[in-house]
Amino acid sequence: MKLIVVFVSGVIFAAGLVLGGMTDPRKVQAFLDVGGIGAGRWDPSLAFVMGGALAVAAIAFAVQPRRAKPWFAERFELPAVRHIDAALIGGAALFGIGWGLAGYCPGPAVASVTTGGLDIALFLPAMLVGMVLTKRFLNRR
Amino acid sequence: MHPYLQSLLGGVLIGAATWLLLAAIGRVAGISGIVTSAFTEREGRDWRWAFVAGLVVGGALFVWLLNAVALAPRTPGLLIAAGLLVGVGTTLGSGCTSGHGVCGLCRASTRSLAATLTFMGAGAITVALLRAVGGLA
């Protein structure tokens, strides 16, 4: 039952990504193209995606962790790290450059695996290699 | 449907999925972390792969239902470089648009706010440079 509910969560997440336009790399780049605000070609759609997601998730994180425990786990396991360091900022900067170059962040890249054609056939394996190698490197230190 | 309304609805669904995962197993829906750990962690492989499977099936289903195939032909080198940057960057920076941009901001994490402003800023600068060299698809 646990795995079915988690699977359904993944399906709903992907539905939101597709409906919101996050799986369209040109739409993502049009959102990041803030230089186009003056020229009238800026597409603010993804701000609406983020706004909708934040509104609902804010309620979720306000009410849910007050429960004794999740339905299928013994406790809530939320990130506890709070400090800002060079790895965080450097990593986020590298991610932002890659996101701007291709218009894909990790969720939409995975959700597009069957529909993204050659774009995703090149982008996704490179992303996975980058993730796994970096994680191995970090674990070894 | 107005495109902004459609985007807002998409966001609401992402928020709902985040809520469901939190209620079910008490975890944040940070996609880069879930995907990376699906390969590298022994513990919790089952739920991580179940979530990834849901993303793949949901993506296929809704792209088909909404007729939303979106391809933007780019050079292979650019796509591979971008993929590596996203993979290395999200792992080094402990999160992506979902983990920092949605879950972290909701939890009032200044760490996630710093990461979100950084990747949004870097993305905007990159797109501006791409536009300057005529590289936008």
Image: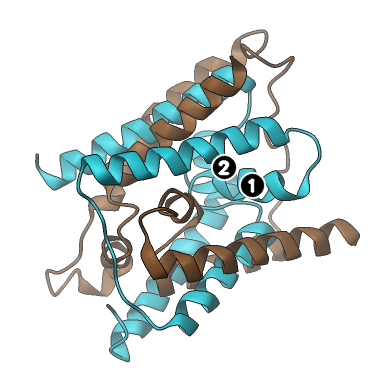
Chain colours: A brown, B cyan
* B24 and A38: which is toward the camera: B24
Q: Which residue is mark 2?
A: B30
Under circle 1, the secondary element is: helix
Q: Residues within 10 Å of mark 1 (few under 14, many from 20)?
A: many
Q: Are marks 1 and 2 on the same chain?
A: yes
Task: Specify the quadrant of the image occupied by residue A16.
Answer: top left
Quarter of the image that includes the N terminus of chain A: top right
Q: Which residue is mark 1?
A: B33
Q: Is residue B67 visible?
A: yes
A52 w.r.t. B100: above or below: above
Indicate the position of residue B25 as horizontal and vertical percent values. 63, 21
Quarter of the image that includes the C terminus of chain A: bottom right
Under circle 2, the secondary element is: loop
Type of amino acid under label 1 = Gly
Q: Is residue A92 visible?
A: no
Residue visible at 46% across and 44% down in the picture? B56
In the rendered structure, the residue with mark 2 lies on which chain?
B
Image position of A108 (left or right of A64): left
Contact flag, marks 1 and 2 (Cβ < 8 Å): yes
Question: Which residue lies most toward the left here?
Answer: B1
Indicate the position of residue A39 as horizontal and vertical percent values. 13, 75
